[in-house]
Image (tube, helix red, strand yellow):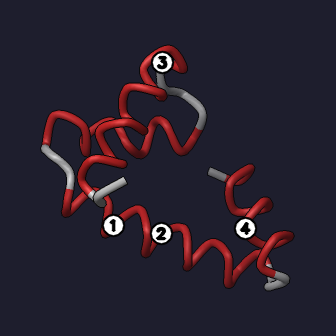
């Protein structure tokens, strides 16, 4: 998750502590809105521990949830 926090910090021009809060908020929202079978794996994906092969599948499903 630290890699994502750093990216958010750099792209948004905010401190890493602010970016960490933003990432945690978005992560919580996503976990609340996605099916439990996916949400239980979100933290491991954010930490970089998840199976990278399934990320595109998850991204596609998330896009469908948000109308993309």
Of labels 1 and 3, earlier in sequence is 1
Residue contact between numbered discs 1 and 3, judged by CB atoms under 8 Å: no
Residues packed near mark 4 inside 10 Å, few (<14), some (14 to 19) or many (20 plus): some
Residue 24 disc label:
2
Which disc, if any, is residue 28? 1
Which is nearer the eye, 42 or 61? 61
Report if the CB atoms under discs 1 and 2 are less than 8 Å apart. Answer: yes
Mark 2 → mark 3, Cα distance in angstroms: 21 Å
Label 3 packing within 10 angstroms: few (<14), some (14-19), many (20+):
few
Q: Which residue is mark 4?
A: 8
C-alpha separation, residue under disc 1 versus residue under disc 3? 20 Å
Image position of 32 (left or right of 12): left
The mark nearer the N terminus, 4 or 2, is 4
Q: Earlier in the sequence, mark 2 or mark 3?
A: 2
Label 4: which secondary element: helix
- Residue receiving disc 3: 51
Label drawn at residue 53: none
């Amino acid at each position: 998750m630290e890699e994502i926090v750093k990216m958010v910090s750099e792209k948004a021009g905010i401190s890493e502590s602010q970016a960490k809060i933003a990432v945690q908020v978005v992560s919580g929202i996503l976990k609340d809105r996605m099916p439990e079978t996916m949400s239980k794996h979100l933290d491991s994906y954010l930490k970089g521990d998840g199976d990278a092969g399934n990320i595109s599948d998850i991204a596609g499903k998330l896009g469908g949830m948000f109308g993309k």
